[in-house]
Image (tube, helix red, strand yellow):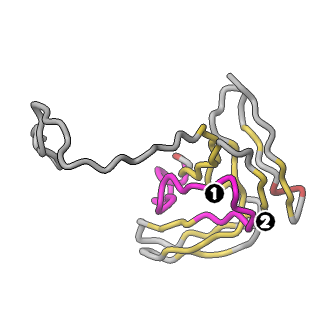
Amino acid sequence: MQDIVVKVKSLDSLFIPEYATDGAAGADLKSAEDGVIKPGEVKLVKTGLFLEIPEGYEGQVRPRSGLALKFGVTVLNSPGTIDSDYRGEVGVILVNHSNKDFSYKKGDRIAQLVFSKVTKAKFESVEQVNSTSRGAGGFGHTGV
């Protein structure tokens, strides 16, 4: 395991990400505001965080399993990517898939943040790509 240093500017020390356990892959992201997400509604929830992620890494915003299971609330564009050159406030796009209002308060854990190395591709234009036994089969072609 390799640790990286991520510089954090926070509007409140309450919002600094924390790992809940020693083995946790994701650090908790907390809401910087109170709010309600109605059934079927999508909302951008502010975290009060501004990050300086080292070049060569990205931050991935992922759902919390407890919110999904207990309340039907998840991160809509999961995982959401925070690029190393982004310096704006981190927001979490939440969606309420349940039939009940979901209320959250300032300081509630709303998502988790995982860091990953970035590999960039060099794209080479060709006339044809090699064939495989699978070919163009996709979207359920191997069955249920």
Where residue 114 sits in the image (x, y, percent)? 62, 42
In magenta segment, residue 84? yes
* Residue situated in front as seen by the camera: 112 or 128: 128
State the residue at coordinates (17%, 46%).
128
Camera-side mark, 1 or 2:
2
Residue 32 rendering spot, x and y as whole percentages: 76, 67
Can you tell which quarter of the image residue 45 is in? bottom right
- The relative height of residue 142 versus residue 13 in the rendered view (above or below) is above
Q: Quadrant of residue 116?
A: top right
The residues colored magenta run: 66-92
Please state which amino acid type lies under the numbered disc 2. Answer: Gly
Q: Which residue carries the number 1 mark?
A: 110
* Residue depicted at x 69% and y 43%: 27
The three-letter code of the residue at mark 1 reads Ile
Residue shown at 42% from the left, 66% from the top: 98
User: Which residue is rendered at x = 54% and y = 54% of the image?
Assistant: 67
Give 141 or 57, whichever is nearer the viewer: 57
- Kindly identify which residue carries mark 2: 48
Cβ–Cβ below 8 Å for labels 1 and 2? no
Specify the quadrant that holds the N terminus. top right
On the image, the x and y values in percent for residue 133 come to 10, 31
Of the two numbered discs 1 and 2 on the same chain, state the one appearing first in sequence. 2
Local SS, label 1:
strand
SS type, badge 2: strand
